[in-house]
Image: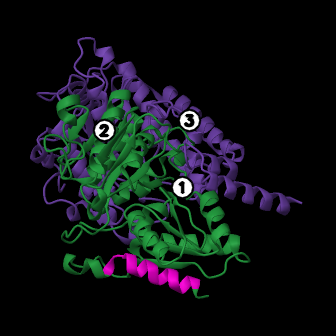
Chain colours: A purple, B green
């Protein structure tokens, strides 16, 4: 596979076999893995429901995560309460792991709100412009360092930032500037690149002549490639990167080598730009399938467990559908109110003008 | 308590006072630490407040502004220096797509108390990209506030007011006036930042201006007075939001208005002022609002900038045309 390094960290093969690695090991319990599997199954269900909702005209757009469940669930579980996430626009499973209500995500893609969701202090709102959030994350991490919240003996006093971006974003100036600033100030930030091989229709070959993780050394911090479809390896590698950031050892770059099984968004058609045998190959690396195989073999789960999770997923799916009619559209009044933190006379005049017009329409 | 200072020194004093007043205030930008900035506005501040409060940045404008977004989210109040007006554009995307929109995007949960200082305008004989007037780009972007000081007293107070504001402020410093000296009153309570000032009262026409053009308009008004014409001069101080109450009440009295700015004519601030005055005072005015501005060309090479920039004579020509209606 082009761009896949022989150094890629993998702890669980596509066949569901555990493999050892010299530097990384999964330190969680089997119970944790059962939980991760459940998270991945529910995330996949949410994604399927949201895609269907878009097809029914209930969402303006959807950005499917299909295939990237392990990269997101594994990294999400490496976070602690004091850590902060800067997502792009596809990190639905990370949001779910952190307990961000899926209604917030649906409201954004429906156009009911602009992204003013719950838990904003630890999971920042989605970023549409490619790569902008890498700088925000780096600045936030600089702030953490200025606050003295890294390198303390009591690890509970330490924090780090994780920022998600894609392979396409690695071409953006802002992302490269973020790497420079992170290195210059030794900021406690982890760049988590989900290399899903495609930036809409543009392949990774168009973004980079070398594996992306190799770029990190040019900026002066470690980069590592991990099997993005292996939740054990993703968790282990993200633990390592976040721990060193919290200890004050600075930034790190993780390239989660994965694949976007679906479209970039519900607006594009992957059959126009990529070969189906690629998709077949990646289907064989499915993150849910491999963990299911492993957990079944060691007897941690069985058909009854899978059936009960399937029931939960169905129930969750119906809850997701039921959310749509409950979503409230933001009001013009609220928008006028939030353009500025401190209101202006000029905009207040426009608000009154709008109110008068709207009242006339109603009458 | 009052002291005569250049605008550059007044800004330096204002920044020092802001750093003293609030430990969350940080300065960041290229060359602002050891060098004190290319115009020395931050001179001595790193020595006094340390490298964590006055931060020398890598040479990356988008990086400076984008990281400041994160610092705001963490509770800091970053004050950024863009070295020259023409260098703000690499950071333009962060300003208009992120800084300006973050508060509304998050339902008011994420204000951006950031100040972006930009030495702006021409008249100093500089090379390309060092003499531009980009204010209309920012004023056209909801979510930003855009201000420009024209004298040392305003420079001292407005920079502090901008830093205290919870909204992002693009702070335009007229670089050709950096070395103009005037009294700074350290004790008198300043006017609100978004209030325009009538810097000269008159009865025949109103000159509306801001930043570097305030002095040009004051000079023009002095010459006109010798010729028997009484001009009122309104210093907007704030470009967005415009203090319409002061502007409209002045023109209601004088019945004539001339807008003066260095930025290119078309779709500049003069267009907005003319449109608004037309809407409000159509039956009051004796003549159409006229504009004296830069021409619709990229800023010219320095040897001919005197032909491009609004001069006292061009302003007085416009006054004559206005009075001839």
Q: Residue at label 2?
A: B13
Q: Position of residue A335 (x, y in %)?
A: 63, 50
Q: Secondary structure at mark 3?
A: loop
> Which image quadrant for residue A190?
top left
Which region is colored magenta?
Answer: B308-323
3 or 2: mark nearer the eye: 2
Res. A101 mark: 3
Q: Position of residue A60 (x, y in %)?
A: 58, 59
Whole-angstrom CA distance, mark 3 to mark 1, is 46 Å
The front one of A337 and B225 is: B225
In the depicted structure, whether residue B183 falls above or below residue B164 = below
Q: Main secondary structure of the magenta part?
A: helix
Whole-angstrom CA distance, mark 2 to mark 1, is 23 Å
> Which image quadrant for residue A209?
bottom left
Residue at the image position 12 percent from the left and 47 percent from the top? A214
| Same chain letter for marks 2 and 1 | yes
> Which image quadrant for residue A360?
bottom right
Q: Are marks 3 and 1 in contact (CB under 8 Å)?
A: no
| Mark 2 or mark 1, earlier in chain | 2
The front one of B280 and A65 is: B280
Q: Residue at label 1?
A: B196
Query: Disc 1: which chain?
Result: B
Q: Position of residue B67 (x, y in %)?
A: 31, 43
Q: Are marks 2 and 1 in contact (CB under 8 Å)?
A: no
Q: Quadrant of the N terminus of chain A?
A: bottom left
Residue at the image position 37 percent from the left and 33 percent from the top? B76
Residue at the image position 89 percent from the left and 60 percent from the top? A363
């Amino acid at each position: 596979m082009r761009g896949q390094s022989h150094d890629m960290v993998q702890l669980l093969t596509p066949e569901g076999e555990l493999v050892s690695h010299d530097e990384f090991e999964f330190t969680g319990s089997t119970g944790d893995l059962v939980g991760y599997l459940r998270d991945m199954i529910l995330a996949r269900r949410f994604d399927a429901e949201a895609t269907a909702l878009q097809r029914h005209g209930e969402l303006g757009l959807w950005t499917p995560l299909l295939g990237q469940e392990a990269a997101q669930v594994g990294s999400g579980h490496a976070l602690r309460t004091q850590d902060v996430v800067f997502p792009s626009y596809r990190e639905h499973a990370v949001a779910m792991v952190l307990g961000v209500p899926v209604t917030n995500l649906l409201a954004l893609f429906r156009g009911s709100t602009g992204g003013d969701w719950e838990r904003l202090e630890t999971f920042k709102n989605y970023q549409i412009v490619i790569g902008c959030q890498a700088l925000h994350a780096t600045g936030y991490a600089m702030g953490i360092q200025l606050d003295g919240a890294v390198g303390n003996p009591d690890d509970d006093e330490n924090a780090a930032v994780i920022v998600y971006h894609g392979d396409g974003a690695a071409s953006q100036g802002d992302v490269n500037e973020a790497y420079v600033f992170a290195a210059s100030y030794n900021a406690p930030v982890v760049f988590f690149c989900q290399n899903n091989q495609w930036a809409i229709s543009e392949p990774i070959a168009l973004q980079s002549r070398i594996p992306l993780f190799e770029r990190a050394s040019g900026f002066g911090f470690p980069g590592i490639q991990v099997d993005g479809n292996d939740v054990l390896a993703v968790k282990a590698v993200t633990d390592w990167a976040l721990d060193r950031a919290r200890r004050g050892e600075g930034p790190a770059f993780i390239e989660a080598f994965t694949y976007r099984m679906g479209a970039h968004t519900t607006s594009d058609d992957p059959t126009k730009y990529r070969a189906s045998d690629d998709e077949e190959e990646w289907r064989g690396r499915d993150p849910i399938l491999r963990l299911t195989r492993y957990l079944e073999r060691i007897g941690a789960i069985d058909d009854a467990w899978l059936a009960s999770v399937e029931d939960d997923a169905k129930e969750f799916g119906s809850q997701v559908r039921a959310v749509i009619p409950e979503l409230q559209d933001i009001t013009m009044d609220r928008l006028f109110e939030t353009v500025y933190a401190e209101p202006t006379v000029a905009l207040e005049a426009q608000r009154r003008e709008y109110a008068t017009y709207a009242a006339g329409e109603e009458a | 308590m009052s002291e005569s200072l250049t605008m550059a020194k007044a800004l330096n004093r204002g920044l020092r006072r802001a750093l003293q007043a609030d430990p969350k205030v940080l300065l960041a930008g290229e060359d602002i630490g050891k060098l004190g900035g290319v115009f020395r506005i931050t001179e001595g501040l790193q020595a006094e407040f340390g490298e964590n409060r006055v931060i020398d940045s890598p040479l990356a404008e988008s990086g400076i502004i984008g990281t400041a977004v994160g610092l705001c989210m963490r509770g800091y109040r970053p004050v950024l220096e863009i070295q020259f007006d023409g260098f703000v554009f690499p950071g333009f995307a962060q300003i208009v797509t992120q800084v300006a929109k973050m508060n509304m995007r998050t339902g008011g949960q994420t204000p951006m108390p950031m100040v972006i200082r930009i030495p702006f305008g021409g008249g100093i004989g500089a090379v390309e990209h060092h003499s531009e007037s980009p204010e209309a780009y920012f004023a056209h972007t909801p979510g930003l506030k855009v201000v420009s000081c024209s004298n040392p007293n305003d420079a001292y107070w407005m920079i502090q007011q901008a830093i205290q504001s919870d909204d992002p402020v693009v702070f335009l410093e007229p670089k050709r006036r950096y070395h103009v000296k005037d009294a700074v009153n350290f004790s008198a309570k300043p006017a609100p930042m978004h209030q325009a000032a009538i810097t000269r009262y008159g009865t025949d026409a109103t000159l509306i201006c801001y930043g570097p053009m305030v002095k040009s308009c004051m000079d023009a008004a002095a010459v006109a007075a010798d010729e028997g014409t009484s001009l009122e001069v309104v210093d907007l101080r704030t470009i967005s939001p415009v203090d319409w109450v002061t502007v409209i009440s002045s023109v209601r009295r004088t019945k004539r208005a001339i807008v003066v700015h260095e930025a290119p004519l078309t779709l500049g601030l003069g267009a907005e002022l003319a449109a608004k005055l037309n809407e409000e005072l159509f039956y009051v005015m004796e003549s159409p609002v006229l504009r004296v501005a830069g021409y619709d060309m990229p800023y010219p090479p320095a040897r001919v900038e005197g032909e491009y920039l609004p001069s006292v004579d061009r302003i007085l020509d416009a006054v004559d045309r206005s009075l001839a209606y």
